[in-house]
Amino acid sequence: MLAIRVAQKDGVFYLVNYKASDILRKVRFLRRYYSEDEDVEVEPRPGEEEIITFIRGVERADKAFQRGLIRKKIKDILNFYETAETQPMIPAPVLLYTSEKLTFTPIGSYQMMGDLSEPSERFMIIDGQHRLAGLRIFQEKHPEEVENVDVPAIIFDGRNEDFAAEMFVIINSTQTKISRSHLIDLMEKVTYGITPEKKWAAWIVTRLYEDSRSPLQYKINKLGGRSRQEKWILQSELYNEIFRLVDPRREKEGKAEGGEGNLHRFIATEFGWDRRGPASDLFIEYFKAVQETMKDAWGNKNYMVTASVTIKAFVRVLGDLLSYPALRDEWRKQRSYEVFLPYLEGWKEMIPDFRKDGFYERFAARGQIERVRKIHTELKRRL
């Protein structure tokens, strides 16, 4: 396999790129054996059956250093894999280990790039076991989509198992990880690399979450943590859609699609990027109009009207609507959800299409990205 050799002091390791299906065949899931397995023995909640089955099947060993797999963490990772669009699924490499000494053969004059032999036994996972566990379940649920997923990996070889255990302890005792949603919460305090448009989009998400007038109040999963309240969409995913509407690069480079970039000029001239202004009313009143149009299907568990893929499509339609001069004029006068209602009237006929039963057949797609696009196309067609 093609690899990059990296030398640091007396240590050497290799960076490789695996197809998801390949790496899942080459790793060994392990957990340190303890007498108590509370997280495994409890009855699975709906939607967790595959996760619990997988955890129960993980090999246990006294000498293993990996902690027991946490079903909540795997569920969150799986949810991210299924809902992430523009974000890479696994941007950071997983760390793998084999006690075998692998053979590295440089290619030509490239001493740091070459062919690395495969171990005879499967790799142990130093870091990334939850990510790969989520990927295994994602593979079972979406076998076609996983073929397009590459996984970066760092391989350590030729050491005893104490080396791997020590590295595991160092990583998990000193590394502080920050989630994408947490970063969005901190954008107000960040200056480097954060544009006014990005800060503005993060502020809109916050207003949609906090404002008592918002139909999305408390329905946005802000940090991916445990919550007693039902959540409809990840904060990071909603942020991505809103930012796309005002991303100046898409407008200037002619890449706008589905409302992308369409709001940039309107927001810049109408409100500026002042996060204290009334720009958030535009989104709040628009979603109030969507809620009014969808009536009892809004927030109804028997419908997919407030599923993440549909909410994303709703955001894209707002970009389309604001391209209508008449609607913009009416908004300036009224600033009320009633401005949007006449344009959304045709959606009432679509409500049966959002029934949970058969939803994925009616909006058949190879993945979430394509499904959002299909829903958006149908919504736009009926404006």
Image (cartoon, rainbow, N blue to C red):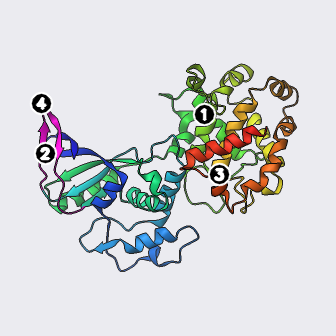
Residue type pointed to by label 4: Ser
The circle drawn on residue 90 is none
Mark 3 or mark 1, which has the lower sequence index? 1
Residue position for label 2: 104
Q: Mark 4 points at which residue?
A: 109
Q: Describe residue 43's horizontal placement relative to residue 94 as left or right.
A: right
Residue 105 among those drawn in magenta: yes
Report the magenta residues as a range: 101-122
Query: In the rendered structure, which amino acid carries the disc numbered 2?
Result: Phe
Q: Name the residue under label 1.
A: 243
Question: Do callouts 3 and 1 mark residues in contact (Cβ within 8 Å)?
Answer: no
Crowding at label 4, few (<14), some or many (≥20) Cα neighbours within 10 Å? Answer: few
Label 3, residues with CA under 10 Å away: few <14, some 14-19, many ≥20: some
Q: What kind of element bears circle 4?
A: loop
What is the distance, in whole Å, between disc 3 and disc 4 at their CAs? 52 Å
Which numbered disc flags the more N-terminal residue, 3 or 4?
4
Contact between labelled residues 4 and 3, with CB atoms less than 8 Å apart: no
User: Residue 222 in the image: x percent, y percent?
Assistant: 59, 49
Q: In this view, does 118 lie to the left or right of 234?
A: left
Q: Position of residue 321 (x, y in %)?
A: 75, 32
Which amino acid, mark 3? Answer: Phe
Looking at the image, is 185 positioned above or below residue 263? below
Q: Name the residue under label 3.
A: 363
The CA span between labels 3 and 1 is 25 Å
Q: Nearer the viewer, mark 4 or mark 1?
A: 4
Cβ atoms under marks 2 and 3 closer than 8 Å = no
**Residue 10 seen in the figure:** no
Nearer-N-terminus badge (2/1): 2
